Image (cartoon, rainbow, N blue to C red):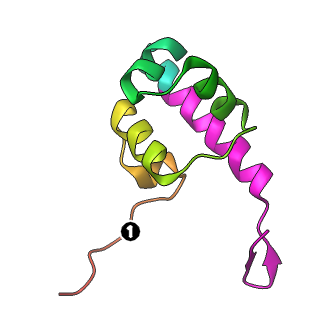
Amino acid sequence: MSVRSGREFDTDAWLRALGRRVRILRLMREMTQDDLATATGMSRSFVSLIEKGTHGVDVVRLLRLAAALDVPLAELLGASPPDRRLPG
């Protein structure tokens, strides 16, 4: 488990939150788990594990999920976009 700002990072809670976001975005797009699995090159059972928050996801799969759900990676991860552009 990693430490951030003196507090432990709750990996399990983060995976559950990611799973909820994936499920909500999938349902908003009227996709089945089979549809999402096909679009990402994953199995339906793996998509199910992600949505349940019981399985970690590598960066490549996160990118595939974001593309299939047509959202920026930051949105999929639950991060809000920056309020302003970086200088330069």
Q: Is 59 or 79 nearer to us in this picture?
A: 59
Apparent side of residue 33 relative to residue 81 in the rendered image (left or right): right
Q: Residue at x 36, y 31 (%)?
A: 68
Q: Is residue 53 above or below residue 72?
A: above
Q: Is residue 55 above or below residue 11?
A: above
The kind of residue on which mark 1 rests is Pro
Apparent side of residue 22 relative to residue 20 in the rendered image (left or right): left
Q: Quadrant of residue 82?
A: bottom left
Image quarter where the N terminus lies is bottom right
Residue 37 in picture, x, y percent from top left:
47, 21
Is 6 colored magenta in this rendering?
yes
Q: Which residue is mark 1?
A: 82
Q: Is residue 82 above or below residue 21?
A: below
Stretch of the chain drawn in magenta = 1-25
Q: Quadrant of residue 33?
A: top right
Q: Residue at x 47, y 59 (%)?
A: 80
Visible residue check, residue 32: no
Image quarter where the C terminus lies is bottom left
